Amino acid sequence: MGLGIGLTPTGDDYLAGLCSVLFISGNPWLKYRDVFISALEAGKEKTTLLSAITLREAIFQRYRERIHHFIFKLTQGESHELAQSINEIKQIGSSSGCDMLYGMADALALTAYFGGEYVYQDCD
């Protein structure tokens, strides 16, 4: 936590994106949410207040409306509209949106590896 530049450091934005996907209801990673909460509590002094709040909220599936729309489309199988949501997320902050998208992409890869849902939408 706290790695990178900005009001919400790059590493924290990545973690927020990671959490926004890993802790979707039904995801096999949901069982590790308490570990993430403990890590956040232990490391929140290493980052900005805004970033710590953003991370905590992402762990509990509360995030910007743009991210909510992306997660909703992802989980409802509306893959034809994902590109628009991705472009909207890219507009968040100077680089925060892109950093969050990297975290989301890695979370989807981890989810696929461990047998979760929502990761093979465009493979039909």
Image (cartoon, rainbow, N blue to C red):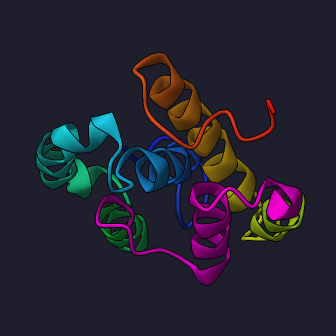
State whether residue 57 is above or below residue 95: below
Relative image position of residue 122 (x, y in whole percent): 80, 38
Image quarter in which the N terminus is found: top left
Image mark count: 0
Name the chief secondary structure element in magenta: helix
From what the image shows, is residue 119 above or below residue 26?
above
State the image coordinates of residue 19 (x, y, percent, origin top left).
41, 50
| Residue drawn at x 59%, y 68% as measured from the top left | 72
User: Which residue sits at x=79%, y=67%?
Assistant: 85
Q: Position of residue 84 (x, y in %)?
A: 88, 66
Q: Is residue 16 left or right of residue 83?
A: left
Question: Relative to 73, is 23 on the left or the right?
Answer: left
Range shown magenta: 58-82
- The residue positioned 42% from the left and 24% from the top of the image is 115
From the viewer's side, name the closer residue of 59 and 15.
Answer: 59
Residue displayed at 29% across by 50% down:
46
